[in-house]
Amino acid sequence: MGSGKNVTLLTIILLLCLFFSTLAFAIEDTFVGGETSAADATGAATPIAWLKAHQYSSGLVESQIGWPDHRSFTYDQAGAAIAFTASGNLSNARRVLSAMASVQNTDGSWYDAYYSDTKAPWEWSKSSGNTTWMVLAINFYEKRTGDKQYAAYAMKALSWVKKRIETDTSSNCFGAVSLGQNFYNIPHPENIFSTEHNLDAYSAFKTRAALTTNLTRRADYKAVAAKIKTFLTTEVWNGSAFYRGCNDNELWLDTQPWGYMVLGSAYSAGLAFAEANMVNTIPWKGVNVTGFQYNNYDTASVWVEGTGQMAAAYGLIGDTNSASFYLNELKKTIRTDGGMPYSFNAIGGAIAWPDNLRYSSASSVFWYYFAKNKVNPFKP
């Protein structure tokens, strides 16, 4: 009798192991390597449902589903909070904003990433761009709801950003915000001025100036924004596209749609430049997907997040044909749970950032939401 019970128990254990092993592979296929066909996307979950499904009890939203250490990048928390706010899911937005408020550094900055469950720092660098994106999220929430409970965190963050501004009037980077502190081990980040980060900062200061009732602070924020705008429009705009940064004439994708969304139609030529120089077609699960690559010399990948940015810009400028075209291309990449890859290339192989990060990614999902719903995250 005892021997028979042991055999039965062992059989049950083996069956349970087989079940959970099969379940694990199913989950991995759904979230990591299980690209769905275009037909599968018709029954996919919505972008907001996906973001909700990957919001931890901590309040943070996991950035990429598949990494074993469950990380939440600050930029992704800001984008998710904006998407939650725009869609009317205010409790989810507050959960993100409250979680990030609880981990703001005493100097006003945020680290670039945290563990999704514990909120402990995952990445110890502090970038101006990610910190200003959190300000963008607070601004967006406050403008849409009138709730000012996070205003102090935004102002504290902007105080840190102001310390990163170039004050040497003889420098061609005068008025611009530098990368940040301890920026991914890049030497002297205080001497590097990214166009992307300054677009973020300009929007953050300009909108916060409109939201604050303190006239002295409003004047200060307006003055900072004006200097950043001068830098953007005279130093890194060449008349056809935005350069990557001060003294950096590389041409990258995100500054083109962001430049239009932040500064308006006078700077929309960057969209045409991207269309002419950064479009690529790559197979995804046997279906060709046309989208945008990172820059004007990479020809091996589709950046799903960046394609969402371009689709959003096209929708906001009123180019409905282009917006619809790229939204339909993006639909081909949607998994049945609503997730979307960050990027993919024609080679495949190992998961790697930036060209072949096939994990479902929060940034791809919320930019797809912005594009579908004509949300400009820089202008609440």
Image: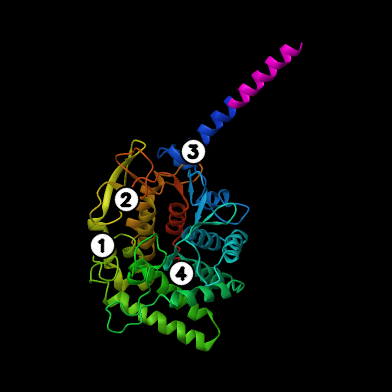
> How far apart are the alpha carbons under marks 3 and 4?
33 Å
Give the side of residue 204 with respect to residue 120, left or right: left
**Label located before the other in sequence (1 or 3):** 3
**Label located before the other in sequence (4 or 1):** 4
Q: Residue at x 68, y 15 (%)?
A: 7
Q: Is 262 a magenta residue?
A: no
| CB within 8 Å, label 4 to label 2 | no
Residue 354: mark: none
Total marks in image: 4
| Circle nearer the viewer, 2 or 1 | 1
Q: Secondary structure at mark 4?
A: helix
Amino acid, disc 2: Gly
Can you name the residue that lies furthest to the bottom here?
A: 216
Count residues near mark 1 (Cα–Cα under 10 Å), then give few for <14, some for 14-19, many for 20+.
many
**Label located before the other in sequence (4 or 2):** 4
Residue 30: mark: 3
Residue matched to label 4: 132
Amino acid, disc 1: Leu
Identify which residue, 158 or 29, lies in the foreground: 158
Residue 291: mark: 2
| CB within 8 Å, label 4 to label 1 | no
> How far apart are the alpha carbons under marks 3 and 2?
22 Å
> How far apart are the alpha carbons under marks 2 and 1?
17 Å
Amino acid, disc 4: Thr
**Label located before the other in sequence (3 or 4):** 3
Count residues near mark 4 (Cα–Cα under 10 Å), then give few for <14, some for 14-19, many for 20+.
many
Magenta span: chief secondary structure: helix
Look at the image and tell me in which quarter the N terminus lies. Answer: top right
| Circle nearer the viewer, 3 or 2 | 3
- Which region of the structure is painted magenta? 1-17
Q: Secondary structure at mark 2?
A: strand
